[in-house]
Amino acid sequence: MLGGLRTLLACLITRHLRSPHPLAIRAWFWPAAEADDLTEKRLCLKAILQVDPENETASLALLVLDGRRQTN
C-alpha cells in the first residue's frame, strides 16, 4: 500500500510541475528505489525518462532490470 501512495505522490508532483523539473524526477526515483515489484520499478523509471529522456541513472537502472529479467 505504501508503494502505491509513493507512486500516486510522484504522479501528482509530475502533473503540477513543468518538465523536466528536478523535483518531478526525484519524485519518481523514490518509488522506483523502494518498490519490490520489478514491474513497478520499471514503470517508475520509464516515467523518469518521459520527464527527462537524457537521464542516465534511469536508463542504466532499466538496463540492469532488463538484464535481471533475462537471467531469471
Image (tube, rainbow, N blue to C red):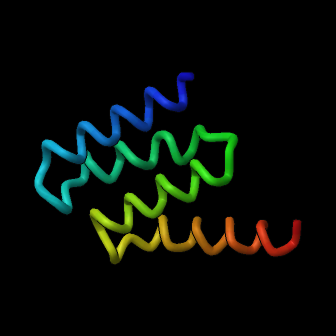
Residue under the image location 48 percent in, 59 percent down: 45
Q: Is residue 20 left or right of residue 40?
A: left
Q: Residue at x 35, y 47 (%)?
A: 26
Residue at horizontal 35 percent and vertical 42 percent from the top: 27
Query: How many marks do you count on the picture?
Result: 0
Image coords of residue 35 (percent x, y): 61, 40
Image x and y of residue 28, in percent = 40, 47
Q: Residue at x 24, y 53 (%)?
A: 22
| Residue furthest top as drawn | 1
- Residue 50 vs 43, above or below: the answer is below
Quadrant into which the C terminus falls: bottom right
Query: Residue 31: x percent and y percent?
Result: 50, 40
Which one is in front, 72 or 59?
A: 72
Q: On the picture, is 68 further left or further right than 64?
A: right
Q: Quadrant of residue 11?
A: top left
Given residues 64 and 69, the one toward you in this image is 69
Left or right position of 34 against 11:
right
The image quarter in which residue 20 lies: bottom left
Give the image location of residue 6, x and y in percent: 44, 32
Q: Name which quarter of the figure residue 50 lies in.
A: bottom left
Task: Locate the N terminus and report the quarter of the image it occupies.
Answer: top right
